[in-house]
Image (tube, rainbow, N blue to C red):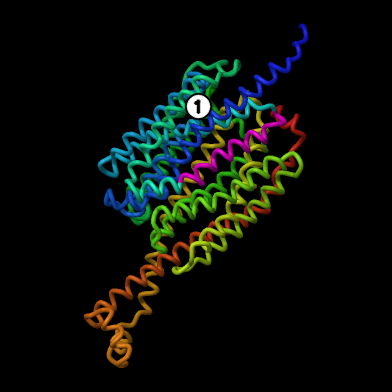
Amino acid sequence: MAAAPAQTPAAQRQETANKWLIALAVMLATIMEVIDTTIANVALLHIRGSLSAGVDEAAWVLTSYIVANAIIIPLTGWCGAYFGRKRFFIFSILLFVAGSLMAGASPNLQMLVACRVLQGLGGGAMMPMSQAILMETFPPDQQAVAMSVWGMGMMIGPVGGPILGGWITDNYSWRWIFYINVPIGITAALMVAVFVHDPSYLRRGIKKIDWWGLWLLGIGVACVQVMLDKGERLDWFDSQLIVGLTAIGTFGLVAFVIRELHTAEPIVNLRVLHNRTFAIGTLFTTIVMFGMYGTYILIPLYCQQISGYTPMLAGLVLSIQSFGTLISIMFAGRLFNKVDPRLMVALGCVAAGIGSWYMARFYAEIDFWNIAGPGILRGIGSGFIFIPLTTLSLGAVSMENMGTASGLFNMVRTIGGSIGIAILVAMLTSGAQIHQSYLASHVDPFQLDQLLHGSPAASAVISNFTRHGAAPMLGMVYLEVQRQAAVMAFVDDFRIIAYIFFILTPLTLFMRKPAARASVSSGH
């Protein structure tokens, strides 16, 4: 075969320009999806009040989206190969836009949850596809830079999304946090249609879809998620429904794994987990996301429930925390080829653990910067975990398996996040009840009565405040007991998140030391 002609300077400039135009096109869609997630977190209490739902029920707005993500993400590689990645990417964007329109117009919680499922089916597919497109577009020696670009795009949502969501919720309505996706989505779809093209190897050997695997995955994930969401409200395994959901979900997931390992054309190619680097990285990121996703819902709830912040102020707290992640992402991409990535991951775990431990010292009257400050440290840790871990994991597989590996990597990451939200919210609810019972047992109404009538000065002050003696005073004390019990429940959750990061720190040593970039990219 004749040698390929060298590229001219004009062709090289054109290739570079196309590379960054493709990155801009796919990242606009990904940013839209991430912004929507963070906006919904800030507006959760307003959605709850508008639709007359409890805190655990309002969390379904988030978990329903995540369940849909988890179901569609492993299908992304197959659908991209069968329909064409470009065509499927555009379809996902338009599905997300349609779901956003209907979510904004939802008259009740059930309709909103159903629309969030549609959003999740569209948004979940966009993330691994954008990741795979960037890894394919950039050469091996620039893949860490590509993941930094992807990570920075991911962080635009946490930085700008909460502020935008808080401002919209304060000044208009929570419904507009969904309507805003329409112009962004249409623009992204047009750019993808113009600049993105499918690679030549993408359509090889695709014949049929593994419907059995799809149904087993959907049933397993959905049942487990509903069990986690409703378990606290139904008293867990004292409920026959929870027992049944657990049995069906476990059977579905086990049968799914068996099916995918024995079918010729699996919907999720689990054999890619034979690669040790990818398998360890996938497990590691699943555990990390348990804590990361949890803080994104706990912090806005704490700010609004305990500190009485507006959605705008709660969004500002989240945005300030996200600056730490932006800083670390910029450094992580540049340091990847100079420093052992395992050390960066360990450093990130330590930083995130320390930040979470400071959150475990929150109190009811804490000021703004003492809430936002520890989050900056946690954000720095997340960037040093995310970039090296993602690049190591996906860089260890072959280019032909990149779509499948990216889909599987993001699926387990999303499942880890959904489990984290469900468990931490359930612990928040049960912990508040436990702490409230303990605190209430130490409230003595007779002492309050003596305070009212034993001291003339105290009696005058308190009676002037309550106007009706001891009964309103007891009501005020009970409200404060509820508030302090909620603070203690939040602190319990933050402490568990800190333990997770500290435990993960030494486990980074069990990861295989990365080889040279040329060999890593070859898939061996």
* Residue that appears at 56% across and 28% down: 404
Q: Is residue 27 left or right of residue 225?
A: right
Helix, strand or loop status at disc 1:
loop
Q: Where does the image place residue 210, in percent across and percent down from the top left?
A: 47, 24
Q: Let me know if residue 247 appears in the view.
A: no
| Residue assigned mark 1 | 267
Q: Where does the image place residue 275, in percent across and percent down from the top left?
A: 66, 34
The segment highlighted magenta reads 140-161
Q: Where does the image place residue 317, in percent across and percent down from the top left?
A: 49, 55
Locate the C terminus by quadrant.
top right
Most foreground residue, 42 or 485: 42
Residue farthest top in this picture = 1
Q: Where does the image place residue 249, in percent across and percent down from the top left?
A: 42, 41
Q: Is residue 508 left or right of residue 77?
A: right
Most foreground residue, 297 or 401: 297
Magenta span contains residue 142: yes
Question: Where on the picture, by quarter, is residue 142?
Answer: top right
* Residue that appears at 36% across and 68% down: 482
* Residue that appears at 66% across and 53% down: 505
The amino acid at mark 1 is Ile
Most foreground residue, 486 or 102: 102
Q: Main secondary structure of the magenta part?
A: helix
